[in-house]
Image (cartoon, rainbow, N blue to C red):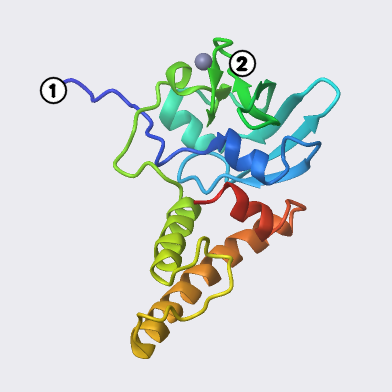
C-alpha cells in the first residue's frame, strides 16, 4: 500500500494572517512573541517589524521530533524568515498591508509557519482542512452572532435589551455572549501580556 503523502492543513499548522496581525499593531514596529495556537510546530514565534524597510522578521525553533516526522531529517536550528510587506491603497483612504511570500515573491494574506521558514500556502503545500478559521476567529464570529441577536453592531458595544425581546431570552443570550467574550478576553490577555495591542485592536479586525 503506498504511503499517504503528508500534506499539512491550515488547521494543524501555525500561520500568520496579515490583517489579523496588522490589527494587533504587529506591522507597525512590533517586537515580541506571537502565539501560533498550532498543533504542529512551534507554539510561539518571535517577530520583529522593521518600519523603515517595512519587513517582518520571524525567528523560531522547530520542535525536533516533529521535524523528523514531517521532513525526515534531524537537522534543525533557529529558523529565521524575513518577509517584505507591501501596502495597497484602500478605496476609502489608508492602506492595507499584504505579505510578499519569501518563497515565490507572490502576494499573500497568509503565511504558514514551516520548518523551512514562512511560506505561502502554495509554496508550503498547505491544504484546507474542515475548519478554516482559528479558534479566536471562531469565538469572535460567535460573539458577533450573539451580539447581532441583541441588536448590537459589534460584540464590544454596550448591551441593551431590544424592545421586542423577552427579558428571559435577553438574559440567556447575554449570559452566553459574556461567556464567549470571556474566552476572547483570555486569548487577548495572553497576547497583551506579550506586548500586543489590546481588545480594541482585536475587535477592529474581528467580525
Ligand atoms: Zn510562495
Between the C-alphas of marks 1 and 2, the distance is 36 Å
In depth, the one of 64 and 202 nearer the eye is 202
Task: Report the residue marked by disc 1.
Answer: 1
Quadrant of residue 30 in the image?
A: top right
Secondary structure category for the residue under label 1? loop
Position above or below: 181 against 17: below
What x and y, as percent, mark residue 150?
Answer: 43, 72
Position above or below: 22 against 193: above
Q: Earlier in the sequence, mark 1 or mark 2?
A: 1
In depth, the one of 97 and 148 nearer the eye is 148
Categorize mark 2 by other alpha carbons within 10 Å: few (<14), some (14-19), many (20+). some
Q: Tell me: is circle 2 under 8 Å from ligand 1.
A: yes
Q: Residue at x 54, y 72 (%)?
A: 182
- Name the image quarter holding the N terminus: top left
What x and y, as percent, mark residue 172?
Answer: 38, 83
Q: Is residue 193 left or right of residue 203?
A: right
Categorize mark 1 by other alpha carbons within 10 Å: few (<14), some (14-19), many (20+). few
Task: Report the residue marked by disc 2.
Answer: 102
| Disc ID at residue 88 | none
Q: Residue at x 72, y 28 (%)?
A: 56
Amino acid at each position: 500500500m503506498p504511503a499517504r503523502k503528508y500534506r499539512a492543513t491550515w488547521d494543524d499548522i501555525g500561520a500568520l494572517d496579515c490583517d489579523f496581525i496588522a490589527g494587533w499593531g504587529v506591522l507597525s514596529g512590533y517586537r515580541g512573541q506571537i502565539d501560533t495556537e498550532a498543533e504542529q510546530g512551534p507554539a510561539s514565534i518571535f517577530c520583529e517589524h522593521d518600519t523603515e524597510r517595512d519587513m517582518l522578521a520571524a525567528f523560531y525553533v522547530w520542535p525536533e521530533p516533529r521535524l523528523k516526522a514531517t521532513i525526515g531529517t534531524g537537522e534543525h536550528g533557529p529558523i529565521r524568515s524575513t518577509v517584505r510587506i507591501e501596502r495597497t491603497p484602500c478605496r476609502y483612504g489608508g492602506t492595507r498591508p499584504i505579505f510578499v511570500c519569501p518563497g515565490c515573491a507572490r502576494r499573500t494574506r497568509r503565511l504558514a509557519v514551516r520548518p523551512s521558514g514562512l511560506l505561502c500556502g502554495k509554496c508550503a503545500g498547505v491544504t484546507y482542512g474542515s475548519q478554516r478559521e482559528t479558534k479566536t476567529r471562531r469565538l469572535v464570529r460567535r460573539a458577533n452572532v450573539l451580539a447581532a441577536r441583541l441588536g448590537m453592531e459589534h460584540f464590544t458595544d454596550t448591551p441593551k435589551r431590544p424592545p421586542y425581546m423577552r427579558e428571559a431570552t435577553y438574559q440567556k443570550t447575554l449570559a452566553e455572549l459574556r461567556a464567549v467574550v470571556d474566552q476572547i478576553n483570555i486569548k487577548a490577555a495572553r497576547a497583551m501580556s506579550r506586548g500586543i495591542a489590546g481588545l480594541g485592536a482585536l475587535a477592529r479586525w474581528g467580525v
